[in-house]
Amino acid sequence: MKKGQNKMRSEYDFDYSKAVRGKYHKQLLAEKSSIIVLEPDVAEAFQDSKSVNTALRSLLKLANTTRQLTSQPPG
């Protein structure tokens, strides 16, 4: 491509004059949503946020079970 030529595909064309800054900011704060950035090698293992959440919930459950088993006195 020649210098100065638009490299963006037409389907990605965006009308920035209609953009609203922080449109969903209050909604995200109200929902107490968190945005976590995964390293590329970790992100490759998951298809979507639902699968990430499922895996993390399983890990938390396992950690909690392990903690309960190891904190009980013998006998």
Image (cartoon, rainbow, N blue to C red):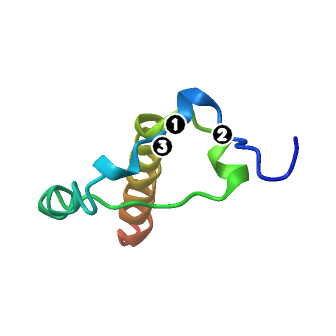
Q: What secondary structure is found at the residue carrying circle 3?
A: helix
* Residues at marks 3 and 1, CA–CA distance in whole angstroms: 30 Å
Position of residue 48 relative to residue 6, above or below, is above
Crowd band around label 1 with a 10 angstrom C-alpha radius: few (<14), some (14–19), many (20+):
few
Q: Earlier in the sequence, mark 2 or mark 3?
A: 2
Residue name at image x 59 percent, y 29 percent? 10
Amino acid marked by disc 1 = Asp
Crowd band around label 3 with a 10 angstrom C-alpha radius: few (<14), some (14–19), many (20+):
some
* Residues at marks 2 and 3, CA–CA distance in whole angstroms: 30 Å
Viewer-nearest residue: 11 or 52: 11
Amino acid marked by disc 2 = Met
* Residues at marks 1 and 2, CA–CA distance in whole angstroms: 7 Å
Q: Are marks 1 and 2 in contact (CB under 8 Å)?
A: yes
Q: Are marks 3 and 1 in contact (CB under 8 Å)?
A: no
| Quadrant assignment for the C terminus | bottom left
Residue name at image x 25 percent, y 62 percent? 22
Residue name at image x 39 percent, y 50 percent? 16
Give the percent coordinates (x, y) of residue 29. 18, 64
Amino acid marked by disc 3 = Val
Label annotation for residue 13: 1
| Quadrant assignment for the N terminus | top right
Say left or right for 18 vs 56. Answer: left
Q: Earlier in the sequence, mark 1 or mark 2?
A: 2
